[in-house]
Structure formats: C-alpha cells, structure tokens
Amino acid sequence: MSRYSRITGTGSYLPPRRLTNAELAAELAAKGVETSDEWIVERTGIRARHFAAPDVSCSDLGLEAAKHALEAAGLQASDIDLIIVATSTPDMVFPSAACILQNKLGIAGCPAFDVQAVCSGFVYALTVADAMIKTGSASKALVIGAEVFSRILDFSDRTTCVLFGDGAGAVVLEESDTPGILASDLHADGKHVGILCVPGHVSGGKVLGDPLLKMDGQAVFKLAVGVLESAARATLTKANLTDADIDWLIPHQANIRIMQSTAKKLKLPLDKLIVTVDQHGNTSAASIPLALDASVRSGKIKKGDTLMLEGVGGGFTWGAVLLKY
C-alpha cells in the first residue's frame, strides 16, 4: 500500500502586541525616521503587524501554534514522532528551536531539527516531512514556522523595518492511505545571497559584521514574481493538474503586489488568493502556516479543497507545495 501524508490539524499564534502602521510610524518618528500609514500600505499592503515581548522566543511562539494544531488534529504531544521547525530567528545558535520546543511539549526521543530557508522555510519543511512520512521514517509530524523578525530589524531603515512581524503557524502532518500532499518543487540560487541577508555572525564571543536585515527590495521583487510562477507550474505538472484545479493560492505573505501578480500569472481570480499580509506583515517562515490556519478556522478553506502553497526568500530560495486539504 502506498503511503501518503495529509494535514490533519492547523494552528497559529500571534504575540499580543499589535502595532498599526500609524503606531509604528509614531515610534519611528521619535527616532527621526519618517514614514506613514499611506506610504506603507501603498507599497506593501501591510496595515499592522505583531511584535513579541523581549522575553518571548521563537520556540515560545512555535509552542503555542503547535498546541493549537495538535488540538485541531485530536492528538497529544506524545503521539508526535517528528518535529521540524522552519525559522531564521531561532532561540540560540544551537541547539535547534525544534529541540527546545520538543522539551517544552514534554516529549523526547523523536527526531527534531530546524530548516533554514528563510521565507521559503515552511514549504521546505513540509516537503521534508512529507518525504519522511512516505518513506516510513515518521507517521505523525509537527511542522512549524516560527519567527521573531523584530529582533533583526534595522529601525533606522524605513524600507525594511515596516515590513516584518513576529508569529508562528503549525500543521500536523499524518500518514494516510489517500493523497494529501500531491507534489512539491524546491529550488535555490546562492548567487543572490546579497539581495536579502543578515550578514553578521558570532565569532570569538562577539558579533562580527552587521546583525541586522539588509534587502534590495527591487531585486527581490523582480526575482520573486518569476520564480513563484515557475515553481507553481512545475508543481502542477508533477501532479498532472492545471491552474484551474487550484481552489486557493496561499503565497508567502511578503507584499500584496507580488502576491497579486503571481495570482494573475496563474490565471487565478484574486478572490482565490489568501491574504493576511495586511494584518500580519511579513512573518517569513511563519507566514504561510499563519495564513493557512486563519483561513481554515474562518471556514474559507474546507476539506477537499486543493491548495497551492508557495514561498520565496533569502538564499535565494523558492518553492511550492500542492496539496488536497
């Protein structure tokens, strides 16, 4: 009998502190940085984001999202035999956020590790979990995207500090005898390292280089639109499906212009595009599972719907996963 994997539960968590554009603009003005709600909305579609408190870590956010996903799946933490956390902002250099989160769940023994593909991280992690389930290495996996990007933002750079937020999303992926994840397509191109990066590193007890996010927005935009369409089409081809078979497009929530452009290239009406960037900002690896959970819990996404998940991020990495929910 063929082994497949299906999402059986979703969960998410946003830190309580919510900042509207106007509130963020007021805080930045006090530091001599000018921006406005109109400026941010026009360029990005973002209206608000959430920031974690100083004592809240990546694994703390991931833990809450994981608990909600487990509850939705009707499982206990002890049922899980694989944990993968997609993050670029882990609690520490090592051990992984996944190992720390495993301990917070009160379980031990199952493999737990992080995947670092920045904003494509959840798509990468979901693909890895699917492969491990299909080969019999796991049967019930927690796949989590969790980020505290507020920790790596340069609040003197208005072109980047207004874009990002903190949060976590999670899914339970279980072994099934009917297909759930239909196909995936992952890529990377390291020659684009410089257009989106945090170039600092730890050495000799000091942070060397710049530990804050740097981005060439125009270069990222141009790359993102092209690779998101190609990854989606490659994934559809692998599954022997077409654009018309997609019920919902859930792209990485980075910029409304990129998201709408991708939908149009796939000949999808904009009412099939899941949008949470306006309320969450760019939460990197957390953005897709956050958007998925919000849409499931609102009743927008229903059992049997065909979903296209796709992400693009620093690395440069990109990819897509097509699944039957």
Image (cartoon, rainbow, N blue to C red):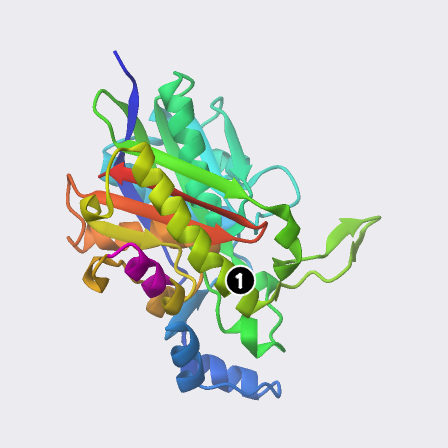
Please, what is the dominant secondary structure of the magenta stretch?
Answer: helix
> Is residue 263 located in the magenta-colored stretch of the structure?
yes
- The location of residue 132, given as percent across then percent down, is 42, 23
Q: How many marks?
A: 1
- The location of residue 60, given as percent across then percent down, is 47, 49
**109 above or below 70?**
above
Q: Which residue is mark 1?
A: 220
The magenta segment: 259-267
The quadrant in which the N terminus is found is: top left
| Whether residue 261 can be seen here | yes
Say which of 126 and 258 sits in front: 258
Farthest top residue in view: 1
- The location of residue 18, given as percent across then percent down, is 39, 70
Residue visible at 62% across and 71% down?
Answer: 154
Q: Amino acid at mark 1?
A: Val
Say which of 240 and 258 sits in front: 240
Q: Is residue 72 left or right of residue 153?
A: left
Figure quadrant of residue 13: bottom left
- The location of residue 104, given as percent across then percent down, is 47, 38
Residue visible at 49% across and 43% down?
Answer: 86
Figure quadrant of residue 4: top left
Figure quadrant of residue 192: bottom right
